Image: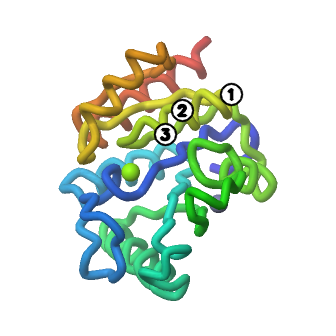
Amino acid sequence: MSKDQNTATVFFDRDGTLNHDTSYIKTPEELVLFPDTLTAIKLCNDAGIRVMVVSNQSGLARGYFSLTDVESIHQYLRDQLGEGGAWIDDFFVCPHHPDDACWCRKPNPGMIEQASARYPISLAKSYVVGDKYIDVELAAKAKLKGLLVKTGPSCEEALRMIQANHLPVACVAECLLDAVNWILHDVKGAEVA
Ligand SMILES: [Mg+2]
Ligand SMILES: [Zn+2]
C-alpha cells in the first residue's frame, strides 16, 4: 500500500510508551521494550499506518548522552522490532532543555510540523500515543486524537491533570496494544464513514 495523505499516522512517544521509562536512557542496554510493543507496532505496519516516534530527550542538552548515543539506541530499537518484522518509519527528537523554550519540545507541536514537512500527513487522520500529560496536550495543540497509555511512571498525575484541565483525550488505555487496537478500530470506522 502506498502511503499518501490518506494514510493514517501515529506519533508514538518513546519512554514509558514503547519501553520502560527508567529516566534518561543512555545506552541500548537500558532500553527495554514492553512485551506488547512489537505486536502493537506490527499491527500498525500491517494496516498501512505510518509509525513515527516523537521524543523529548533533554538529556542531550543536559550532557547526559550524545546524539550518537540516541542514534544507537534507535538503531537497537529498529533491530528489536525488525526481528519480528515491524518497523518505525521515522524518529523525531527534541534535543533541547526545558528552559530553552524551543518549539519542538512536547507539548509544543514542532516535531509534528517537522514530520508534516517530510511526509504527506493528514492531521485529521493522525494520533498521538503517550504516557504523559504533555503527550495528550500535544495532540490537543496539533489537533490530533490523543491517547494516554497507563504504562509510564506518572500515569496518575497525567490522569489528574487531564481531568483538572478538561483536556480532550480519545482513549485511556491500559497498555500499548489496547491503544493500537483502539486506533485500528477508529481508522476502520473512518474508512466506512
Ligand atoms: Mg514518555
Ligand atoms: Zn526542542
Mark closest to the chain's N terminus, 3 or 1? 1
The mark closer to the camera, 3 or 1, is 3
CA separation in Å, label 2 and label 1: 16 Å
Q: Secondary structure at mark 3?
A: helix
Q: Which residue is mark 2?
A: 137
CA separation in Å, label 3 and label 1: 19 Å
Q: Is mark 1 within 8 Å of ligand 1?
A: no
- Residue appearing at x 35%, y 69% in the figure: 24
User: x%, y% of residue 66?
Assistant: 51, 85
Vertical order, 192 against 187 (above or below): above
Vertical order, 30 against 166 (above or below): below
Disc 3: CA contacts within 10 A as few (<14), some (14-19) or many (>=20): some
Vertical order, 101 against 138 (above or below): below
Instruction: Give the amino acid type for the residue marked by disc 2 in the picture.
Output: Glu
Contact? badges 2 and 3 (CB < 8 Å): yes
- Residue appearing at x 56%, y 57% in the figure: 98
Vertical order, 59 against 121 (above or below): below
Q: Which mark, by number, is residue 93?
A: none
Q: Which residue is mark 3?
A: 134
User: x%, y% of residue 40?
Assistant: 33, 48
Asked whether residue 160 appears in the rendered view, the answer is yes
Q: Which residue is mark 1?
A: 124
* In this rendering, position of residue 116 left or right of residue 28: right
Mark closest to the chain's N terminus, 2 or 1? 1
Q: Nearer the viewer, residue 105 or 75?
A: 105
Find residue 157 and report its image quarter.
top left
User: x%, y% of residue 1?
Assistant: 63, 49
User: x%, y% of residue 148?
Assistant: 37, 33
